[in-house]
Amino acid sequence: MKKIKKIKIKVNGKISTIDDNLTMSVYLKKLKIPLKKVAIELNREIIDKNKLKKIILKKNDQIEIVHFIGGG
């Protein structure tokens, strides 16, 4: 059985350890993030949600997940 390598990334300022070669899409599903209600930034660049399946997370990536809050 092949051992899965782990990497560290930073999510909203906190260090997280994840499996290597994880896509942004799979990671966000694991976190149960409602994609319609958030903006996602990877290494200070806003990500197009249509590209989440193609983005492979790498060691030391920095993710910011910003929730939209309605109000008036």
Image (cartoon, grey):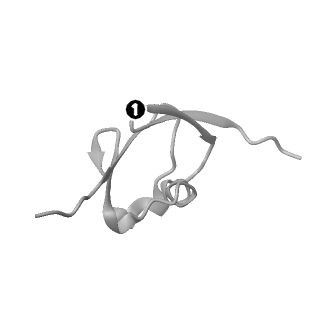
Residue name at image x 61 percent, y 41 percent:
18
Q: Residue at left 80%, top 40%?
A: 3
Question: Is 44 on the left or on the right of 59, as rendered?
Answer: left
Q: Amino acid at mark 1?
A: Gly
Q: Nearer the viewer, residue 14 or 17?
A: 14
How many numbered callouts?
A: 1
Q: Quadrant of the C terminus?
A: bottom left
User: Which residue is under mark 1?
Assistant: 13
Does residue 31 appear left or right of residue 3 in this picture? left
49 with respect to 23 (left or right): left
Which residue sits at x=51%, y=39%? 58
Locate residue 20, reporting x and y percent. 63, 42
Secondary structure under the numbered disc 1 in the rendered image: loop
**Is residue 1 found left or right of 19 in the rendered image?**
right
Seen at 34% across and 38% down, the residue is 43
Furthest-front residue in this view: 72
Q: Position of residue 24 (x, y in %)?
A: 49, 54
Return the x and y of residue 11 as percentages of the image width and height. 44, 39
Mark 1 is surrounded, within 10 Å at the Cα level, by few (under 14), some (14 to 19) or many (20 or more) other residues, namely: few
- Closer to the camera, 69 or 47? 69
Q: Quadrant of residue 64?
A: top left
Who is closer to the viewer here, 14 or 42?
14
Query: Quadrant of residue 62 in the image?
Result: top left
